[in-house]
Amino acid sequence: MDIASSVSLKPHNTLCLDAQADWFVSVRNSEELVSALDFARERNLAVFPLGEGSNVVLRERLPGLVVHMATQGIQLRRDDGREACLRVAAGENWHDLVVWCCDRGLHGLENLALIPGSVGAAPVQNIGAYGVELSDWIQGVEVRDIQSGALGYLSASDCEFGYRTSRFKTPAGKGLLITAVDIRVDRNAEIRDGYPTLKAALKDDTPSHRQVLEAVISVRQARLPDPVVTPNVGSFFKNPIVPAETATRLLQQYPDLPSYATAGEDVKLSAAWMIDQLGWRGKAQAGVAVSRDHSLVLVNRSATSSEAVLGLADAIRRSVRDVFGLELVLEPQVLGAPDSEKQ
């Protein structure tokens, strides 16, 4: 294990922002992680867990120890012939896991294919797509307390999952580092093909799990820019969830505004539609642009700092607030300190 100082994080975030970590370490097992946390504790350093950097906006400086989770491994914990439980190391690639499961007839995750990032980052965001969320299939999460180094475990209910959020986004949860995720898979899982975009891509009225997987991959490749080619973090804004009376008022004024029922009485409204209506698709400023393929995606053309990315995001949020009276919330986490706070 090599703990290095003053390390550029440009290769470690899919926006390709030129952030710098005061200290950086890549850990491959629990022993290295414990040693890294001891190093941080002895020096009173903040700890920033980092997977593949696909859902973060990095400020110019991360003042502490960045712990890159590179742990690998998939263990079969339980199998009753129909359902199985897998323990997956935090450093595993999420999409690779989805394909690995489908190849073995272990189903449920197909709708979440091609979501960039690592397995350890997936519960933080409670990733979701095409009518499925990770919380539908998660059994629990193994964690390590950053301050004490103690190993712990959170059940799915302990994780406090919500729409694109979890306990790990709260102040208390940010003190926990995810080391592994327990995921339930089902050989006879219900096929979820009702999402309109996905249904349109499927040629079979009774698709197989494999066909759903392939359709999800095809739709995502067609609609979302590849972060390896075009730096981005996927959807930059959450769809606003509003009380039914607010939705009714807005739909009376904007009858074409897409809306979706939620598990409760609230209504989810399309942030992409609002951004499109305000003419943001394709617009650029300071080296950052709204993708021409999908208006929820901000792409980095030439910016090196977070200020340009967040500046465009703030301009979009202000315009949505002014016209629709709604506050858009960012999906990616913003980590670190701005350039003005560099030492």
Image: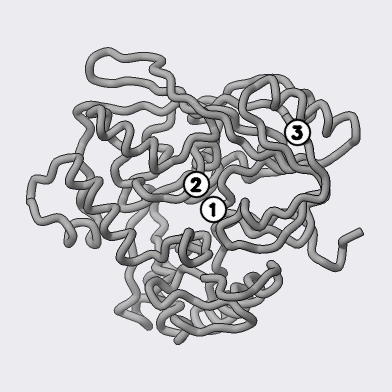
Which residue is denoted by mark 1 in the rendering? 54
Which residue is denoted by mark 2 in the rendering? 117
Please state if 337 lies on the left or on the right of 306 as rendered. right
Please state if 129 lies on the left or on the right of 71 as rendered. left
Between discs 1 and 2, the one toward the N terminus: 1
* Distance from Cα at disc 1 to Cα at disc 3: 24 Å
Classify mark 3: helix, strand or loop: loop
The answer to which of 302 and 258 lies nearer the viewer is 302
Please state if 222 lies on the left or on the right of 15 as rendered. left
- Marker disc for residue 175: none
Between discs 3 and 2, the one toward the N terminus: 3
Which residue is denoted by mark 3 in the rendering? 2
* Crowdedness near tag 1: few (<14), some (14–19) or many (≥20) residues, C-alpha within 10 Å: many
* Distance from Cα at disc 3 to Cα at disc 2: 23 Å
Classify mark 2: helix, strand or loop: loop
Amino acid type at circle 3 is Asp
Please identify the quadrant where the N terminus is shown. top right
- Would residue 64 be visible to someone looking at this image? no
- Would residue 138 be visible to someone looking at this image? yes
Q: Which residue is at 37% across, 53% downward?
A: 262
* Crowdedness near tag 2: few (<14), some (14–19) or many (≥20) residues, C-alpha within 10 Å: many
